[in-house]
Image (cartoon, coloured by chain):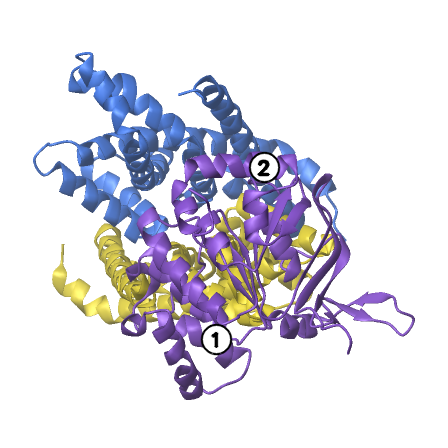
Chain colours: A purple, B blue, C yellow
Amino acid sequence: MSEPTPAIEGRAIDKSFGDTPVLRSVSLSVMPGEVVCVVGPSGSGKSTLLRCLNWLSPPTAGEVFIAGEPLGKRRNADGTFAPLGERALRRQRSRIGMVFQQFNLWPHRTALENVIEGPMIVRGLSRRDAIERAEPLMEMVGLADKRDAYPVRLSGGQQQRVAIARALAMEPEILLFDEPTSALDPELVGEVLSVMKDLAARHTTMIVVTHEIGFAAEAADRMVFMDEGRIVEEGPPRTILHTPKEERSRRFLEKFMSRSSAMLAADPETPR
Amino acid sequence: MLDFARVTDAWPQLLEGAVTTVQLTAAAAVLSLVVGLLSAMLQLSRVPGGYWISRVYVSAMRGTPILVQLFVVFFGLPLIGIRDQNFLAATLAIGLNSGAFVTEIIRASVAAVPHGEVEAAESIGMGKRHVWQRVVLPRALVTSLPALTNEFTILLKATPLASVVAVTELTYAGQLVISRTFEPVEILLTIAATYIVIALTLSQLSRWLERRYAVLWAGS
Amino acid sequence: MDWGLMLENTPLLLLGLRWTIVVSSAGMALALALAVGLVAMGRTSNRLVRGIARVHTEIILGTPNLVLLFIVFFILPEVGLVIEPFTAGLITLGLYYSPYLAEVIRGAMNAVPRGQIEAGEAIGLSGPRILTRIVGPQAIGMALPPATGLFIGLIKDSAILSVISVAEMTFQAKQVIARTYAPFEVYVLVAVGYWVLTFLLELGLRRLEGRVTRYRSL
């Protein structure tokens, strides 16, 4: 093959809620091993884009491909698309991991049980095999000692790290993060970001919707700036952050810059 | 086949029964509200033993069938010298039973009155009695309107039990008609429909009350 | 009060208590089955099916249980369905409590946060699996307290079955009164019987609730 296939690709995605358009012809493709951060003001459609990319809310128009395979649709012989069955969609969806803003752990299952649920029920692993696979993940997110705790006993940061392990347990080809630190107390943000940085360093394919510009600057291969349901600008973080071409991204980023000088400190290339 | 002509003949008798049903419902509801309020206040007050008296009353009423309570009252009244007062017995039994549920409703809505409003009343120098009369109770009663309507609908649906002590409310009137005509189907369906209409009227009435006060106080 | 006479007649009342428990349990089981059906009907996209569930609910909510009992007992035979008083009784109790129980189930299911369901969808759990593994276990804990209240209400309402001669406790009380001519005492005794029964039931179900909601405090 002359051109490598993107791990995930959205083509001309439109999404409206009733008469309100939220996404207008958004196209985004992410290569295997690439880390993409999506930033932009609230209401710009970032989270909706993620939810379209794993079909939690199917797009009004447009296609999503995972490793070249159409998501939620079946390609007919004549090149048109037909909706895919429930079961096939579920199988596809399990290839895309999702980490939610509100963690969404299941409170009636322990940390470990949250992680092994998918491997057991969706993949059909025995409990023992699932635990065997889950243990290194609990280790990786630094919660090996909390495996038998119920979510109610975990801090927000710990819950989110369990949620990351839960997503990883499905061995997804792509991980989607929907503002994973927005619901956390400031002092708990770091522990979650550090797990995400580990993942990025291992070349996990990730799309991260975030307000943590510092994280984006450090970990992202590419930054995407969205506003009013469109991708306004994309490119290497350094370019986007320091020489944004578009007026809208400049204004948005200026606000962030002035607010967090910590971000500047995080970027070694910034002239002082 | 259904033949509602028979119902037309029996209409005056059924109507009379329906009027008695409404009277019984109203009398029992008033008793229930008064007893419920008193019992809730007793539970929240510092009257010695008040809490337990109210708890035991609520528990006994909620733990035993209203039909059995009706029999206890009906056969108990003559023991204290009150005879041939079937309507009174039914009102007492149904009202006291419902009062236990009203106690719980009032208690919950009193607990829901924001503490700040009580403090505000105390801070302008209101005494305990006035805080209750002017702030807590009016607020609690309006909050509890939906639950109270619900409770009074249940109360309405308990009134047919009065038929077992020969109060000629709607259901007993219907039974009398049936025993004359031996045609239960049309009569029973008519009776059921009448109850549904009364219940719907009741809920409309409460919705109107609720709108009136809720809108008035929406800003609070 | 002649306690010796009461004592002599207690076995009959206990026999009635047994039938109260039997008919109430059967009625509750039927109510549960109907309620699950109503909830399922309310969730379909078919408007006719949803409409039927709604009409059923509205009719039951407005009809007194005694009237419903007469309808079941007197009208079913008119359309050729001759049934025993016991059967009529349990059908009435089941029918009467089905919409209330359906509302409890609906409320409990809706109380499970949407995000948890999405988390299940995101790892590829099927609809039925999400129901049995995520929504169900939590909904049971939330539904138990109000469902206990309904069960107690149903047990108490089973007393009306005495009107059509189902041999439950209140009916047996009438039999005892016919022999002893002490209605007040017998009914007080029977009231205590119901009180103890409902009290024990509440105690037991509260313990069960504690067990299924342990995850909230552990």
**Kind of element beneath mark 2:** helix
- Which residue is pictured at 25% across the width and 28% down the height? B115
- Which residue is pictured at 25% across the width and 56% down the height? C195
**Disc number for residue A250:** 2
Total marks placed? 2
- Which residue is pictured at 60% across the width and 39% down the height? A249
Residue extending farthest to the top is B124
Q: In which quadrant is the N terminus of chain A drawn?
A: bottom right
Can you tell which of label 1 and label 2 is closer to the viewer?
Answer: 2
Determine which quarter of the picture holds residue C17.
bottom left
- In the rendered structure, which amino acid carries the disc numbered 2? Arg
**Kind of element beneath mark 1:** loop
Is C181 placed left or right of B166 in the picture?
A: left
Foreground of the two, A4 or C130: A4
- In the rendered structure, which amino acid carries the disc numbered 1? Ala
Q: Position of residue C57 (x, y in %)?
A: 58, 50
Measured Cα–Cα span from mark 1 to mark 2: 39 Å
The answer to whether marks 1 and 2 mark residues whose Cβ atoms lie closer than 8 Å is: no
- Which residue is pictured at 45% across the width and 44% down the height? A271
Give the chain of mark 2.
Answer: A
Residue extending farthest to the right is A78
Give the chain of mark 1.
Answer: A
Is A258 placed left or right of B137 in the picture?
A: right
> Does residue C99 appear anywhere in the picture?
yes
> Does residue A212 appear anywhere in the picture?
no
**Disc number for residue A169:** 1
Q: Position of residue C177 (x, y in %)?
A: 28, 58
Q: Position of residue C79 (x, y in %)?
A: 69, 62
Q: Is residue A16 above or below residue B210?
A: below
Sequence-earlier tag: 1 or 2: 1
Same chain under badges 1 and 2? The reply is yes
